[in-house]
């Protein structure tokens, strides 16, 4: 205790000298702690991104296969195609209908992999509706007809609507991401899917134009069926509105023309019935435990499909890379900066203590000559070192809270991060980020939902959030401990080797 | 008077680049309580080495140094306690701790010995007043003091733990004649009034008149001088 008091007294009785050392240490420590804060933030965000991006995959018919089929058809004339269609057996017609779909069996088999945490199955189809009109689509088709001078294509008509089915309405990516929100009623449930309950969720504008409300029924046609058995009564259980389209319009005008928003959402089993493709889905969507399981999932996919080129397994791994790469680069750069700054800290404290102790050799000799033990003298100098390091660390920790974020922004800008990264990630080649799937697919709709997480992760990637966290203080204490120990090494070595007679003889 | 300090056949050799230097060569000496012993000699004669041997700052190669019959050169001797409590040093360069006030410098040996703070302070004030260091100077640091004041503070520090032996190495070396005389008088008083065993090494032979015993050191060997 007396040594502590003596050390503390010695610390504040040498203000100028200690101030210089504290200032030098402070600069290096502030840089070290800022780098550390950036590293911790980057690592934390990489972990978060790993949890939410890059761990989404979809099994679907490959684009190569689709191109191959289109090429075959293009080689035939229209008359040949119609003649062939007329001669097709029922089995051949069914095969034609499901050629771009995946069997549920295949989708379920892939879901059995241990890495999969949640999965869903999605079917998108165009379904004819009885007595429901789509004024926006009618005006668009009318315009097209006038321009071409002929009727519109057979696959698009004003009474044909896009249906999207999955196993649980709440996990449909559009609803999970908030692009579409329920304004009345409720979404269909997993039970509705299991029991194939004929329920549907309708878009708000379409509902208003057709006088539909929750509890009303609409009639849909089963593809490929005829007569009374081809009609299915669907009960409207919910009405939604499209948020994203309105936001994009900035004036709400775009929302008035929104044919894409007229999608009907229904249980997968109901859409399968209406499309005449029971047992088939457009895609199986999977969320697995981590981006690190991508390889395992691809191997499982190869095992399930037998390497058949007809199917492909798409992931949002490129999204992960687009988001994580700048973060990882920033983390690496910050480690280099941290190491350099810590090295400078070590050098400063060693040199400073060498100068301080060297300049006080006579004092050391006198202390030993008047009966101070090595331990007493070392303890006194240890307190001085700790006071110097503590003052520098406290100041540095305070400054880090102010400059940490700026340092992070600076490193991110040098690592290709920032807002531009977010944009490029959103426009990633496979388009998985916002659509939640490959282009043209209805999007991911796993029970955990991919879309929402991908969006939020992009927002995280846009800015590195250097949060002042408890672990940083713990690291600061550890650094303080280490540099204090280093600083003490000089007086310890000096004091234990010092011979007072030799020092005092130099008069 | 009883023998307090007994030096028997002590030698010390230093190894230098130029070869071995026998700084102290078979020196024997007795010093008693209440007596001032003076060792004079030219620079390099070995007198300071002899003083450091007595103060246990150096270890002799040969011989014995006994204080009250206890050999301080024996392996079991507690030299830290010896330096702290039985011997007090006064140096030519004063060697006060620059960051400490006069009061704190005097209290330092007591602090190292674990004396309670209140006692430290009272004794330090008493010693400094005895050395005619006023209250204002007691709170001053050494850089605000004259040479004589510093040396008196140094003597007070040497007396802090009330040692039996006071060792003074050229105590007047950095002082003018008048101030030097004051310091010599103080040291003589410590021997003759307080019963301390005072040993002064110096090249200033004017101190001879206050010494009870005087020796001349030459080439590491000691010979008596008639005082």
Image: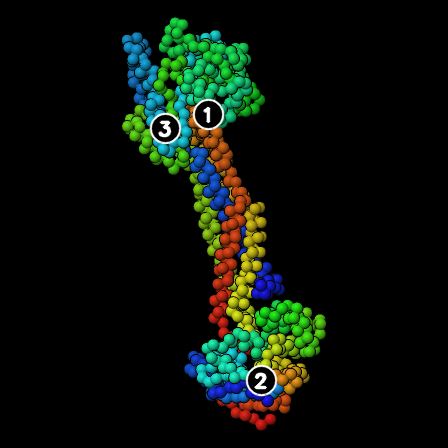
Q: Chain of mark 1?
A: A
Can you tell which mark lies on residue A279? none
Name the secondary structure under disc 2: strand
Residue placed under numbered mark 1 in the picture: A171
Q: Crowdedness of circle 2 by 10 Å Cα count: few (<14), some, many (20+)?
A: many
Say above or below: A309 vs A343: above
Q: Nearer the viewer, residue A362 or B152?
A: B152
Could you tell me which residue is drawn at 64 percent across and 68 percent down? B117
Q: Tell me which chain the residue with mark 2 is part of.
A: B
Residue A80 in the image: x percent, y percent? 29, 11
- Residue A303, quarter of picture: top left
> How far from the left and from the top, in percent, is residue B55?
53, 79
- The CA span between labels 1 and 2 is 98 Å
State how far apart marks 3 and 2 are (Cα).
97 Å
Tell me the crowding category of disc 1: few under 14, some 14 to 19, or many 20 or more residues within 10 angstroms, Cα based: many
Q: On screen, B170 above or below A496?
A: below
Discs 1 and 3 carry the same chain letter: yes
Residue A129 seen anywhere in this rendered image of the structure: no
> In the rendered image, which residue does mark 2 sit on?
B199
How far across and down, in percent of the image, does residue B53 sit? 51, 81
Number of other residues with Cα within 10 Å of mark 3, as a class: few under 14, some 14 to 19, many 20 or more? many
């Amino acid at each position: 205790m007396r040594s502590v008091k003596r050390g503390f007294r010695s610390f504040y009785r040498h203000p100028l000298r200690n101030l210089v050392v504290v200032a030098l240490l402070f600069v290096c420590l502030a840089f070290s702690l800022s780098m550390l804060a950036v590293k911790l933030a980057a690592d934390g965000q990489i972990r978060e991104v790993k949890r939410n991006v890059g761990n989404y995959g979809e099994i679907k018919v490959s684009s190569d296969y689709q191109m191959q089929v289109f090429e075959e058809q293009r080689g035939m004339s229209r008359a040949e195609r119609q003649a062939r269609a007329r001669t097709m057996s029922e089995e051949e017609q069914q095969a034609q209908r499901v050629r771009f779909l995946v069997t549920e069996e295949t989708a379920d088999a892939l879901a059995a992999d241990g890495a999969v945490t949640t999965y869903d199955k999605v079917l998108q189809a165009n379904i004819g509706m009885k007595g429901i009109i789509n004024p926006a689509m009618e005006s668009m088709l009318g315009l097209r007809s006038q321009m071409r001078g002929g009727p519109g294509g057979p696959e698009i008509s004003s009474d044909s609507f896009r249906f999207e089915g999955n196993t649980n309405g709440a996990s449909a990516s559009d609803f999970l991401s908030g692009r579409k929100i329920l304004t009345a009623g409720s979404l269909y449930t997993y039970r509705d899917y299991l029991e194939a309950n004929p329920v549907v969720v309708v878009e708000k504008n379409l509902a208003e134009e057709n006088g539909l409300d929750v509890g009303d029924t609409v009639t849909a046609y089963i593809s490929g069926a005829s007569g009374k058995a081809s009609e299915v009564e669907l009960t409207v259980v919910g009405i939604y509105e499209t948020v994203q389209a309105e936001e994009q319009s900035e004036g709400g005008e775009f929302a008035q023309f929104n044919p894409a928003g007229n999608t009907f959402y229904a249980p997968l089993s109901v859409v399968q019935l209406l499309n005449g493709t029971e047992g088939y889905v457009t895609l199986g969507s999977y969320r697995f435990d981590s981006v690190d399981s991508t390889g395992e999932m691809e191997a499982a996919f190869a095992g399930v499909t037998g390497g058949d080129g007809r199917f492909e397994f798409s992931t949002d791994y490129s999204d992960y890379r687009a988001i994580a790469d700048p973060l990882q680069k920033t983390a690496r750069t910050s480690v280099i900066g941290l190491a350099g700054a810590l090295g400078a800290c070590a050098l400063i404290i060693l040199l400073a203590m060498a100068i301080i102790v060297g300049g006080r050799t006579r004092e050391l000799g006198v202390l030993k000559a008047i009966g101070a033990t090595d331990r007493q003298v070392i303890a006194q100098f240890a307190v001085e070192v700790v006071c110097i390091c503590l003052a520098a660390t406290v100041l540095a920790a305070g400054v880090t809270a102010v400059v940490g974020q700026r340092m992070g922004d600076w490193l991110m800008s040098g690592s290709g991060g920032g807002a531009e990264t977010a944009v490029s990630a959103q426009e990633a080649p496979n388009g998985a980020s916002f659509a939640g799937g490959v282009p043209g697919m209805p999007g991911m709709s796993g029970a955990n939902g991919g879309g929402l997480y991908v969006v939020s992760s992009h927002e995280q990637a846009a800015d590195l959030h250097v949060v002042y966290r408890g672990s940083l203080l713990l690291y600061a204490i550890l650094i303080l401990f280490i540099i204090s120990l280093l600083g003490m090494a000089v007086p310890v070595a000096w004091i234990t080797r010092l011979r007072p007679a030799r020092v005092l003889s130099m008069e | 008077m009883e023998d307090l300090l007994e030096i028997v056949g002590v030698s010390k050799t230093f190894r230098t680049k130029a070869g071995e230097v026998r700084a102290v060569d078979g020196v024997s000496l007795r010093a008693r309580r209440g007596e001032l012993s003076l060792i004079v000699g030219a620079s390099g004669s070995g007198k300071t080495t002899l003083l450091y041997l007595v103060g246990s700052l150096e270890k002799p190669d040969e011989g014995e140094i006994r204080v009250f019959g206890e050999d301080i050169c024996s392996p079991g001797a507690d030299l830290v306690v010896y330096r702290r409590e039985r011997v007090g040093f006064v140096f030519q360069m004063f060697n006060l701790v620059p960051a400490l006030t006069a009061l704190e410098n005097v209290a330092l040996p007591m602090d190292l010995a674990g004396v309670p703070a209140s006692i430290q302070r009272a004794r330090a004030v008493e010693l400094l007043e005895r050395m005619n260091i006023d209250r204002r100077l007691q709170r001053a640091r050494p850089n605000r003091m004259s040479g004589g004041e510093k040396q008196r503070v140094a003597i007070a520090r040497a007396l802090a733990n009330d040692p039996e032996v006071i060792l003074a190495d050229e105590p007047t070396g950095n002082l003018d004649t008048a101030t030097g005389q004051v310091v010599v008088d103080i040291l003589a008083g410590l021997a003759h009034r307080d019963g301390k065993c005072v040993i002064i090494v110096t090249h200033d032979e004017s101190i001879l008149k206050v010494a009870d015993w005087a020796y001349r050191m030459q080439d590491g060997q000691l010979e008596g001088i008639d005082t």
